[in-house]
Amino acid sequence: MELRFILSDENYAVLSKKFEVLANKRHLRILNILEKGGKSNDQVYEILKKDGVYLHRTNTYRALEKLVKQKIINKTYNGEKKKFFYTIS
């Protein structure tokens, strides 16, 4: 996976917050999981649980929401499955 950012006088504060989120190895693991395709919170949690990364589903949700807030990943609702799915922006 390759991430690119353009640094300018206007966006350095925004980038700083993104880098702070990306400094967490668990968040990077989530990006690695989502690189293979969109997943629900439950699917991401099950993969992370097998890896021993997160023990509680709520921690996975919080990590996903931090990545959404920084616009690193997208969150969409699938009405058919009645779940939110996360994809890389």
Image: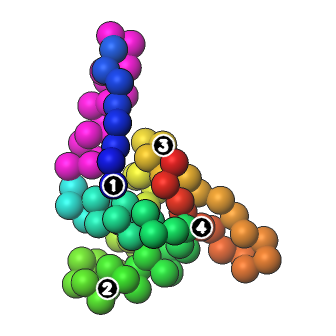
**Mark-to-mark CA distance, 3 and 4:** 14 Å
Magenta portion: prevailing SS class: helix
User: Dot 2: within a 10 Å radius of its alpha carbon, few (fewer than 14), some, or many (20 or more) residues?
Assistant: some
Q: Amino acid at mark 3?
A: Lys
Residue of label 4:
85
**Where does the N terminus fall, quadrant-wise?**
bottom left
Q: Secondary structure at mark 2?
A: helix
- The image's colour scheme reads rainbow
Please report the bounds of the magenta region as a residue range: 9-23
Q: Earlier in the sequence, mark 1 or mark 2?
A: 1
Direction right: furthest residue: 80
Q: Are marks 4 and 2 in contact (CB under 8 Å)?
A: no
- Horizontally, residue 6 falls left or right of residue 80, namely left
Q: Earlier in the sequence, mark 4 or mark 2?
A: 2
How crowded pointer 3 is (Cα within 10 Å; few <14, some 14-19, many 20+) is rated as few
Q: Badges 4 and 1: C-beta atoms under 8 Å apart?
A: no
Instruction: Identify the element where label 3 is drawn.
Output: loop
Q: Which mark is residue 1?
A: 1
Query: Which amino acid, mark 4?
Result: Phe
When the figure is inspected, residue 9 is found, relative to residue 26, above or below; the finding is above
Q: Is residue 87 visible?
A: yes
Kind of residue indicated by mark 1:
Met
- The answer to which of marks 4 and 1 sits earlier in the sequence is 1
C-alpha span from label 3 to label 2: 24 Å
Kindly identify the residue that appears in the image at 34 percent across and 43 percent down.
3
**Displayed quadrant of residue 48:** bottom left
Q: Mark 1 packing: few (<14 Cα in 10 Å), some, or many (20+)? A: few
